[in-house]
Image (cartoon, helix red, strand yellow):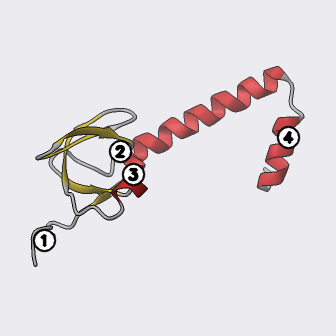
Amino acid sequence: MKELNLDQVKNFINNANRETLNEVADTFNKAFRALIQNEASEFNIGDRVKVTHKKFAKSLRVFTVQNLNKKTVTITDTLGTFRVSPNLLEPVPSNHDCFKA
């Protein structure tokens, strides 16, 4: 199978008919769901994680994984519960203590 660069893929999509675009969208959606499920499978309930989103960049908050869904991971800390995409999470080493001086 011939590999295409990104510009060639964009050109193909821009010139495709509706039927082909539907097939491309279906393939993309399946691949994207598989990617998210793979990212979520890296975590287990009880794992300690931090959020890598830019709004949390300077935060020292450490969360605990409470639930794993198809598209999101539910995390909690003393201030609340959040549902986030697994690609925004990073594991915290077990010896990490955010309160050390």
Please tell me which residue is depicted at 9% across the width and 74% down the height of the picture: 100
The residue that mark 2 highlights is 40
Alpha-carbon span between mark 3 and mark 4 = 31 Å
Residue 60 to residue 70: above or below: below
Report the residue that reaches farthest toward the right. 15
The residue that mark 3 highlights is 88
The residue that mark 1 highlights is 95
In which quadrant of the rendered view does residue 69 lie?
A: top left
Question: Contact, CB < 8 Å: mark 4 with mark 2?
Answer: no
- Left/right of residue 47 with respect to residue 83 in the rendered view: left
In primary-sequence order, the first of circles 2 and 3 is 2
- Left/right of residue 12 with respect to residue 36 in the rendered view: right
Please tell me which residue is depicted at 56% across the width and 33% down the height of the picture: 30
Alpha-carbon span between mark 4 and mark 2 = 32 Å
The residue that mark 4 highlights is 12
Q: Secondary structure at mark 1?
A: loop
The mark closer to the camera, 3 or 1, is 3
